[in-house]
């Protein structure tokens, strides 16, 4: 068994998730999609780990697995010393307080028939003994924390702006004082000016409550702003992981390099060239053999089509899985189980 450091809040080992759909007469045929393939990850207390990648790469599935909104088909997840995949329904319900998720579209996560005060009170009624004046007081406190006031309490979700609705979703997520929040594209559905306000609010809440975030987004500029470290995903696997600065200043994996080259830069004379990837992301139902990125990689070699690349340490807390790094000394080939 691998020792888990005290600074680690969450550790995921070899997480795989396969979805099976049935079709044909009496559902005799199966269609299998491997959304996650042997993902290893550690998240430190109080940090923000950004997850980036194109649509369909498995970012959201990973977030949902980590808080067991869905149960992975294989792997192990330890949150603050608790093996969450081994919990029964009642123990899991208790642990729900510790981990929450905020979704991209706040309007689809808020019951349109309920008023704001009831929406925020709902998790408190379900998981705590708070009632009457004490409950009202806590609801008001939570709304003030996210920048809303008494005037919003009796509104329905459709009477709120996108930013206000996302603040309500955040106050619900904070209601039970969680340790770990999965933020799934929490600003993507908002106007740019409102995005900045929500990002700043998230940073303030993190500082105030010592929260740990998994921040999922396809927007690299936003991820860079908020994340301490970034994991880059491609077709159900993490292909590179490093500090935000290292990912942006020294990307090692060709896919990361292409992603970074597509982010806007303030200086038009920076000389940065955009790498245009050919083709679409292959289907996770039938991923390419060897390196999954080989069908689109500008540096593809013969070995890439046959052999899956190992993860290489390329700097302090920085690793990437690519055959271009195979020439590095053999002791820099690392076991993903030991990645910090
Ligand atoms: Fe490209 Fe090969 Fe590296 Fe994959 S292993 S990213 S195909 S060079």
Image (cartoon, grey):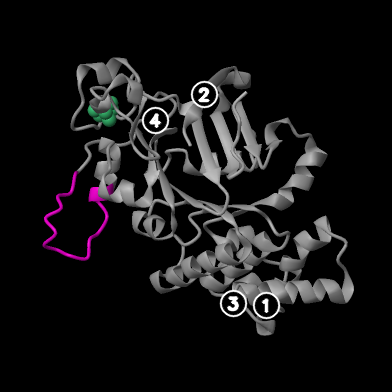
The residue at which mark 1 appears reads as 155
> Can you name the residue that lies furthest to the bottom here?
151
Q: Residue at x 74, y 72 (%)?
A: 139
**Pointer 3 with pointer 2, Cβ within 8 A:** no
Asked if residue 265 is among those painted magenta in the image, a careful observer would answer yes
Residue 191 image position (x, y, % from top left): 42, 70
Q: 264 or 28: which is nearer to us?
A: 264
Q: Give the number of the disc on residue 147.
A: 3
Ligand 1, by image quadrant, is top left
Mark 1 or mark 4: name the one nearer the start of the chain: 1
86 is higher (above) or lower (below) than 274: above
Q: CA distance from mark 4 to mark 3?
A: 42 Å
The residue at which mark 2 appears reads as 31
Q: 122 or 39: which is nearer to us?
A: 39
Q: Residue at x 49, y 31 (%)?
A: 39
Q: CA distance from mark 1 to mark 4?
A: 43 Å
Q: Is mark 3 within 8 Å of ligand 1?
A: no
- Of tags 4 and 3, the one toward the viewer is 3
**Pointer 4 with pointer 3, Cβ within 8 A:** no
Q: Which residues are magenta?
A: 260-275
Q: Mark 4: which secondary structure? A: loop
- Of tags 3 and 2, the one toward the viewer is 3
14 is higher (above) or lower (below) than 278: above
Mark 1: few/some/many CA within 10 Å (<14, 14-19, 20+)? some
Q: Is residue 68 left or right of residue 288?
A: right
Q: Is residue 195 left or right of residue 113?
A: left
The residue at which mark 4 appears reads as 283
Mark 4: few/some/many CA within 10 Å (<14, 14-19, 20+)? some
Q: CA distance from mark 3 to mark 1?
A: 15 Å
């Amino acid at each position: 068994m691998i020792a888990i450091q005290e600074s680690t809040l969450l550790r995921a080992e070899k997480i795989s998730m396969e979805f099976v759909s049935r079709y044909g007469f009496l559902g005799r045929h199966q269609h299998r999609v491997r959304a996650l393939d042997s993902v290893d990850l550690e998240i430190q207390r109080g940090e923000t780990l950004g997850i980036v990648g194109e649509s369909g790469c498995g970012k959201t599935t990973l977030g949902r697995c980590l808080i067991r909104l869905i149960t992975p088909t294989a792997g192990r997840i330890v949150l603050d010393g608790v093996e969450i995949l081994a919990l029964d329904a009642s123990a899991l319900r208790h642990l729900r307080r510790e981990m929450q998720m905020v979704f991209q579209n706040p309007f689809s996560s808020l019951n349109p028939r309920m008023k704001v005060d009831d929406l925020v009170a709902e998790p408190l009624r379900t998981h705590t003994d708070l009632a009457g004046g004490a409950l009202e007081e806590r609801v008001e406190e939570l709304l003030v924390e996210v920048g809303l006031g008494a005037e919003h309490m009796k509104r329905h979700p459709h009477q709120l702006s996108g930013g206000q609705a996302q603040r309500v979703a955040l106050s619900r997520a904070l209601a039970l004082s969680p340790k770990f929040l999965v933020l799934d594209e929490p600003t993507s559905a908002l106007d740019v000016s409102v995005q900045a306000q929500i990002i700043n609010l998230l940073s303030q809440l993190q500082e105030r409550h010592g929260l740990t975030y998994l921040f999922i987004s396809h927007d690299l500029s936003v991820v860079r702003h908020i994340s301490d470290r970034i994991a880059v995903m491609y077709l159900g696997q993490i292909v590179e992981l490093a500090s935000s600065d290292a990912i942006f200043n020294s990307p090692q994996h060709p896919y990361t390099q292409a992603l970074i080259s597509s982010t806007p830069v303030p200086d038009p004379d920076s000389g940065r060239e955009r790498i245009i990837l050919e083709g679409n992301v292959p289907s996770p139902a039938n991923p390419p053999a060897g390196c999954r990125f080989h069908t689109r990689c500008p540096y593809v070699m013969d070995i890439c089509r046959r052999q899956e690349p190992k993860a290489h340490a390329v700097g302090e807390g920085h690793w990437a899985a690519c055959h271009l790094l195979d020439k590095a000394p053999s002791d820099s080939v690392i076991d993903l189980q030991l990645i910090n």
